Image: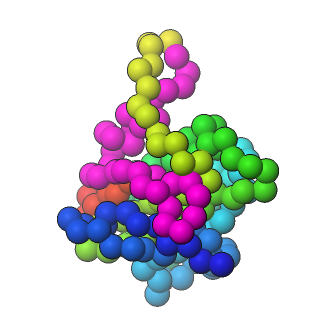
Amino acid sequence: MSRDVKCPVLASEVSVSAHTAPPQPASPDLSEAQWRLPHGPRSAGQARALLRAQLADWKVTDDTAETAELLLSELMSNAIRHARTPTGRQIGVRIAQYDGRLRVEVADANSARPEPQKADTDDEQGRGLAIIHALATRWGCCPRLHGIGKATWAEVSLFQ
């Protein structure tokens, strides 16, 4: 079953499919890849491995790939740590190339929007959205169209 996420892609809003396709092999012919992963701590590493393989096949530069991997790691950490979801719900991961941009999206079944935290110097958590804000050219959050939850996304230039 496919779900759509209505998220701004450019200045106008368009619907983009996301988050429920079965795992796909990496392919240089795709401009989009998506996976569903279990809602658990091991999924962040699996998502990073899938991202690295796809970006290598797309021949994305090392700097851009490393930035995208860090963004994905922060988005996955937020979804795993903060999204209180019913048992059995999965996390959707989507990456897409368009108009010289690379978008990394993570969808979870919790509708609560991420809120930046004020982290003290000695805090070990609370800086994820600040990192995303610092590294991404754009980022945001939107509800999942025809589904529960939200998609949080970040974009970087493919020409860093």
Q: Quadrant of residue 26?
A: bottom right
Along the line of sight, which residue is nearer the eye, 81 or 30?
81
Examine the rendered structure and indicate whether residue 17 appears above or below residue 152.
below
Specify whether 56 is left or right of 156. right
- Give how far across and how far down residue 97 sits, in percent: 37, 72
Q: Position of residue 98 (x, y in %)?
A: 32, 74
Out of 65 and 138, give the one closest to the viewer. Answer: 138
Residue lying farthest to the right in this orientation: 87
- Does residue 126 belong to the magenta stretch? yes
In percent of the image, x 59 and y 58: which residue is there?
A: 148
Q: Determine the residue positioned at 34% across, 57% down.
A: 155
92 or 87: which is nearer to us?
Answer: 87
Q: Is residue 27 above or below residue 39?
A: below
Instruction: Name, please, the residue furthest toward the front.
Output: 146
Residue 36 at what x, y percent from top left? 66, 65
Q: Residue at x 32, y 57 (%)?
A: 156
Q: Residue at x 26, y 74 (%)?
A: 99
Highlighted range, magenta: 123-152
Magenta-span inclusion, residue 17:
no
Q: Which quarter of the image is occupied by the C terminus?
A: bottom left
Instruction: Point out the image quarter for the N terminus.
Output: bottom right
Res. 19 visible in picture: yes
Query: Which residue is farthest left?
Result: 11
Q: How is the image coloured?
A: rainbow
Label total for image: 0
Residue 77 visible, this orientation = no
Estimate the x, y position of residue 57 in percent, counting from the top left.
Answer: 49, 76
In this rendering, position of residue 103 left or right of residue 158: right
